[in-house]
Image (cartoon, rainbow, N blue to C red):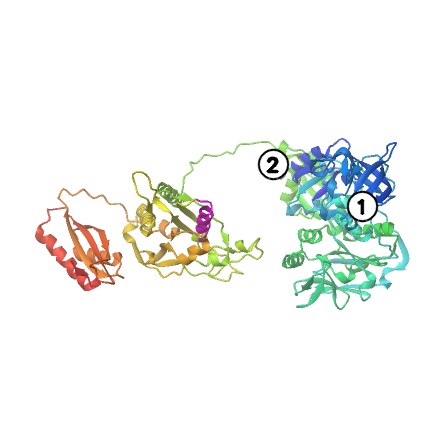
Amino acid sequence: MLVSYKWLQEYLDLSNISAKELGDKMSVTGIEVEGVHYPSEGLKKIVVGKVVECVPHPDSDHLSICQVDIGEEELSQIVCGAPNVKAGIKVIVALPGSRIAGNVKIKKGKMRGQVSNGMICSLQEIGFSDSVIPKEFSEGIQYLPADAVVGEEVFSYLGMDDAIIDLSITPNRADALSIRGVAHEVGAIYGQKPVFKDEPLVEVARPAADKIKVSVAAENDAPAYQIRIIENVKIAPSPQWLQNRLMAEGIRPINNVVDVTNYILLLFGQPLHAFDYDQLGSQEILVRRAQEKEALVTLDGETRQLTTEDIVITNGRIPVALAGTMGGLDSEITDKTTTVALEAALFDSTAIRKTSQRFNLRSESSARFEKGINRGTVGEAGDVAAAMIAMLAGGEVLSGAVVGTEEVVENAVVTTTLAHINWVLGTELSVKEVTDVFAALDFPCLEENGTFTVSVPPRRWDIHIQADLVEEVARIYGYDKLPSTLPSGETVAGSLTANQQKTRDLRSLLEGAGLTEAISYALTTEAKSESFLLKASQLTRLDWPMTEERSVLRLNLISGLLDDIAYNVARKNHNLAFYEIGRVFYQEHDPLKDLPQEEKHLALAITGEMIAKDWQDKSVKVDFFTIKGMLTNVFVKFKVADRITYQKAEMADLHPGRSAEIYLDEVKIGFVGQVHPTVAKGYDIPETYVAELNLVALLEAEVAPLVYQTVSKFPTVSRDIAMLVAEEVINQAIVEVIRQAAGKFLKKVTLFDVYQGDNIETGHKSMAYSLTFVNPEATLTDEEINRSMEKVTKALIENVAAVIR
């Protein structure tokens, strides 16, 4: 909310309070001030000039040579390229040596051989945004009022001798989305009561009810709705003071009628809408819900397909406006308008919010209806607007407002006690101090034996309960005056939970292995979310995503790591190793009704060289076993390595021959493998290996207690065995057969050689294992070892069709 300091001064005495001091004070009393802007800051030597003579430039088809009176003895020649420059107008002149917007310095010079002593400025060139400049001057220079004094600084004529206070309004303080609301707030801070000098309403004898009939189909859609009729208006530009006020607040001036509705929006926080009465097509206004697929062409020229969730203003048959959001094109105010139907209403906030979101039509009006407006001044705002239109457009206000619905608003009564206030705030306030606070807020208050019965006016609809009153006392009394106290009680040493400690240890392990932690967005595209799935799930979509790249919640962590790898590879970083610990979002039920289930995962992604080439070592590229080894270290850390098994993975996003699913006991907890070359090409990355685990399953896995075993004093015995097996037989299956057949003295099985090539039958591979045996109670004999090896050989032949070499 932008607030004009000079506008506030019309209702309060701020002569001894600067805009900066006011902003600081408001910030410490509950309404944050983001900054104070001075429109004329940085500008100098910009004055009022009068174009006395204007002739075309002899060497240009778009330049004009102007003789301009700037209040000096002689006229000043300025070459101007504006299409609307002409003799007899008063303009903005930047003199030689002046500073305009952007800290640009204006110098005396020549344009196409003609001397130019300065510059005739547009509003853009002195700091106004294109979005607020009246359309008639948007492509040219600004005309100043006829009474502007030649030679004086222009700032007072354009409202630039002001300070604009930028307020950050929270939803609970929507009362401050109006100048009157801010005036009440400032008055409470400085112990003043604002005095509003509204234009008095003068009505003619002709009743408005003879011109229009108003009805509301459902009162809860529009609890308050009324129309005033103003006849014989003449549409014209607004006076300069009104245009200045709107532009300072970020609103483009349109014409005297529309500008009044926007002025009242700022003053009261009450949205209004003006219809061209003669273009309504009937003498009836009906407020109702739209019919399914009913159409309305809005002021922006777009055809809107409506639903039953939309509240519309109709002429009894067809919609003429989208309630609280945007008017209809056919009934807008134009230069030909002579009779205005002025709407003042209160609409259902939920319906307005849904409509504005669905059509992406966020406006000053819809924002106020969504957050709430003062229900007590709906009619008053309409009356003041009608009076101003009559004054500025020469119209006649017909007698009486035609009311469709009307809400009787009473002050809310809230009670609190002095003891409760002091207990909550830790203060020792007296009855008088609390009473003075309520008086400053202009809340009628009755005190009896320390109990305050407070009557809260409708302009502060955010106050309902006792805690609200305590907050108001704290704000106005001063947060800086509240006593500081230290918390009492015993201190308790902080500690990590078991899962937090395990996660911290996991990070240390991975970083010790050379990986770097990455943090990726939880929002991604549908395609990326549906890749690398650990389990099937529905997507959780955002209703209003900022971009399509951030439209759904992720179902995996790997796609984010691959984005990180692609980003680094594009910048010539090739040896990369990332890990991420984060949540994925599974949706097993209706995404429109149920929240997704969050599950913590661990993901790894590596590419490039594991060992870089130097004078001593050859380079070694990462491969499947590099990342599998990292995972093995993780499983050892979690003490579940002996319960982990691998099975062939059937995932379209992974290389079919270099991937595996990971199981903890009988439960699938992850996968590991090379990114499929087609997928890697889509990310524009080289050969990359990834893994993803359900970290929750690891954290919650039951671990057998550590049992101490003495080191055997008897020697170990190692035997090697080599075999030919079919190519599809996996190491895991062979190790399991060996362990089951070797007996209780087998301590370790190690694969030390795998070979395919010459002298090996096609479709087969040679695998060699070292088996380590030990008996903790006696020395093993050759007979015992031989028996175990015979059992192993027989089991391998029977179970995996091995040919022992």
User: Which residue is found at the position 62% from the left and 39% from the top?
Assistant: 420
Q: Nearer the viewer, residue 501 or 533?
A: 533
User: Which residue is found at the position 26% from the left and 61% from the top?
Assistant: 727
Residue 180 visible, this angle = no
The quarter of the picture where residue 416 lies is top right
Q: Amino acid at mark 2?
A: Leu
Q: Amino acid at mark 1?
A: Leu
- On the picture, is 599 further left or further right than 472? left
Which corner quadrant holds the N terminus? top right
Which corner quadrant holds the C terminus? bottom left
Q: Nearer the viewer, residue 366 or 719?
A: 719
Residue 117 at x, y = what percent? 79, 35
Badge 2 marks a residue whose secondary structure is: helix
- On the picture, is 514 further left or further right than 118? left
Residue contact at pointers 1 and 2, CB within 8 angstroms: no
Residue 534 at x, y = what percent? 40, 57
The span picked out in magenta is: 559-572
Residue identified by numbered label 1: 242
The quarter of the picture where residue 167 lies is top right
Q: Can residue 473 be found in the magenta stretch?
A: no
Badge 1 marks a residue whose secondary structure is: helix
Q: Nearer the viewer, residue 487 or 633?
A: 633
Query: Mark 1 or 2, which is nearer the eye?
Result: 1
Residue identified by numbered label 2: 425
- On the picture, is 48 further left or further right than 25? right
Predominant SS of the magenta segment: helix
